[in-house]
Image (cartoon, grey):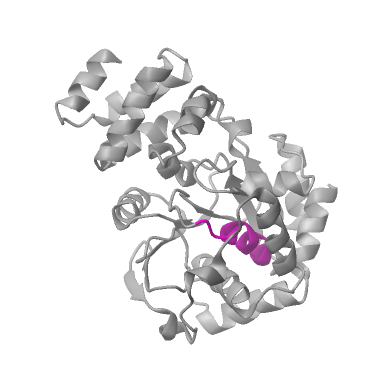
């Protein structure tokens, strides 16, 4: 690690192979906490490169416990986190709304590091038991249209950096990696990023793959469609700037999508929305994200059609049924 840190402190970049080797060594717990913290801090100070991100990603995917869900045309809906906005669990709610429309969702998530409540915190609070058993996950997809892949169950390599990430309480390059390493390799992905550079990195890397994808970055820093500002939306062949008014939506104040100060606060908001009792602002944010997820799966679908399908799922309590079935099974 000393040699790697010297390279980085000289403001040089790692090759893809060097990045891959470092992450494999991290997984094998070859470095101490101080070295890990120093290494992670470098990528908070300067942007990560395509080669570095690709090398880290390749290592994590190789080391992951993989599951084959290819019998289902799944989508993952996930953000980098680390935007510091402390919203309610928009991507998790969106996942259940999409599942309620009949689509299969393979949601990849983790405990929160830099906000009050991550997707794993939320599902655990509802009594969901994490698993990496392939047959169980397939059963969840069949019965609830959604399965949840709790990252630590599939990425043992991440265990080595958990304490350091928790101690730092800041976004690191592991936030950037998370959405790119779903162990089931879903055919469709709606990914959110906390800055525009990461969105472009994702677009560059994913263009060479066969999956359908949409990448979202809100111009005021959210890693999802927040309706508080315009947002960039990337697909394999397009890059668009979209503003809420383009979608027939009112622009929101940040307070309208605040997630509270604890997991309990976030769970209360989550339950209210999924029970069809959310505010208009809360509902519109979730439904807009769900509509773009549905459009990612089928790019011929209009936003208006996708939004109405999402609305029927949420307000018709189909999303709630998916949550109940997931927790029960």
Residue 214: % across, % down: 44, 62
Tell me which residue sits at (56%, 39%) in the image.
183
Image coordinates for residue 59, horizontal then vertical, percent: 42, 28
Q: Who's the residue at 71% across and 78% down the image?
A: 312
Measured from the top left, where is residue 165 in percent x and y? 47, 32
Which one is nearer the viewer's eye here, 122 or 29?
Answer: 122
Vertical comparison of 287 with 52: above or below: below
Task: Say whether residue 50 is left or right of residue 140.
Answer: left
Q: Which residues are magenta?
A: 86-99
At a point 72% along the width and 38% down the height, the residue shown is 130
Q: Position of residue 310 (x, y in %)?
A: 64, 74
Residue 120 magenta-drawn?
no
| Residue 254, placed above or below residue 122 | below
Image-based side of 171 in relation to 146, left or right: left
267 lies left or right of 66: right
Residue 69 visible, this orientation: no
């Amino acid at each position: 690690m000393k040699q790697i840190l010297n390279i980085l402190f000289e403001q040089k970049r790692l090759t893809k192979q060097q990045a891959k080797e470092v992450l494999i060594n991290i997984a094998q717990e070859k470095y101490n906490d101080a070295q890990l913290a120093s290494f992670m801090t470098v990528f908070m100070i300067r942007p990560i490169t395509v080669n570095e991100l690709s090398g880290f990603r390749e290592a994590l995917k190789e080391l992951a416990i993989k599951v084959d869900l290819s019998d289902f045309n799944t989508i993952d809906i996930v953000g980098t986190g680390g935007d510091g906005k402390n919203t309610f669990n928009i991507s998790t709610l969106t996942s259940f709304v999409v599942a309620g429309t009949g689509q299969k969702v393979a949601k990849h998530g983790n405990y929160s590091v830099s906000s009050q409540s991550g997707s794993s915190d939320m599902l655990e609070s509802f009594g969901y038991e994490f698993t990496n058993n392939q047959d169980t996950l397939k059963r969840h997809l069949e019965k609830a249209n959604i399965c949840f892949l709790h990252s630590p169950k599939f990425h043992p390599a991440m265990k080595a950096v958990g304490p350091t990430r928790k101690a730092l309480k800041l976004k690191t390059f592991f936030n950037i990696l998370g959405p790119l390493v779903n162990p089931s390799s879903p055919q469709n992905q709606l990914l959110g990023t906390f800055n525009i550079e990461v969105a472009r990195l994702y677009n560059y890397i994913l263009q060479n793959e066969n999956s359908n994808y949409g990448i979202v970055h809100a111009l005021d820093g959210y890693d999802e469609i927040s309706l508080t500002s315009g947002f960039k939306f990337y697909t394999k062949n397009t890059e668009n700037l979209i503003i809420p008014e383009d979608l027939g939506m009112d622009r929101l104040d940040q307070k309208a999508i605040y997630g509270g100060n604890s997991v309990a606060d976030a769970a209360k908001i989550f339950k209210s929305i999924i029970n069809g009792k959310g505010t208009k602002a809360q509902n519109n944010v979730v439904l807009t994200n769900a509509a773009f997820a549905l459009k990612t799966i089928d790019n011929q679908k209009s936003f208006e059609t996708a939004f109405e399908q999402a609305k029927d799922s949420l307000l018709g309590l189909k999303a709630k049924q998916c949550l109940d079935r997931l927790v029960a099974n």
